[in-house]
Image (cartoon, rainbow, N blue to C red):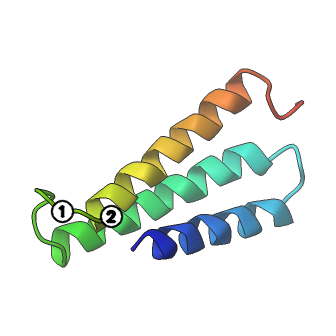
Amino acid sequence: MFTDWLISVALCLALALVLPIANMPFSLAALLSLAGFVWLGQAITRAGPPVDSPHLTAWDAALLSFAASFGVQAAAHLGAFGS
């Protein structure tokens, strides 16, 4: 599941890098949020409850995607991307 999440993040990065550099942080944050909603939908419909799992679940992947999105938004707000 962790590799699946990494692949979804890599896809978000690849799509965001195609856009102009001024829009990249905001589009990356939006794509990561969208990926978080997709993971959340998968967790609700297919995964079991997020209790006592020794490995990454779809619930965890959704949380990581949302956290990464908020991190990118915070970094952009603080000027980490130079724009």
- Position of the C terminus, as image quadrant, is top right
Q: Residues within 10 Å of mark 1 (few under 14, many from 20)?
A: few
Q: Position of residue 70 (x, y in %)?
A: 52, 37
- From the viewer's perspective, is 54 left or right of 22? left
Residue type pointed to by label 1: Ser
Q: Residue at 69% across / 44% down in the picture?
A: 26
Q: Residue at 29% across / 65% down in the picture?
A: 55
Position of residue 68 relative to residue 82, above or below, is below
Q: Residues within 10 Å of mark 2 (few under 14, many from 20)?
A: few
- Position of the N terminus, as image quadrant, is bottom left
Per the image, the residue denoted by label 1 is 53
- From the viewer's perspective, is 32 left or right of 45? right
Q: Position of residue 41 (x, y in %)?
A: 28, 68
Residue type pointed to by label 2: Leu
Name the secondary structure under disc 2. Answer: loop
Per the image, the residue denoted by label 2 is 56
- From the viewer's perspective, is 16 left or right of 12? right
Residue 18 image-quadrant placement: bottom right
Name the secondary structure under disc 1. Answer: loop
Q: Residue at 15% across / 58% down in the picture?
A: 50
Q: Residue at 73% across / 68% down in the picture?
A: 15
Position of residue 72 relative to residue 28, above or below, is above
Residue extending farthest top = 78
Please report contact status of discs 2 and 1: CB closer than 8 Å, yes or no: yes
- From the viewer's perspective, is 56 left or right of 30? left
Q: Position of residue 77 (x, y in %)?
A: 69, 24
Task: Report the disc number at residue 34.
Answer: none
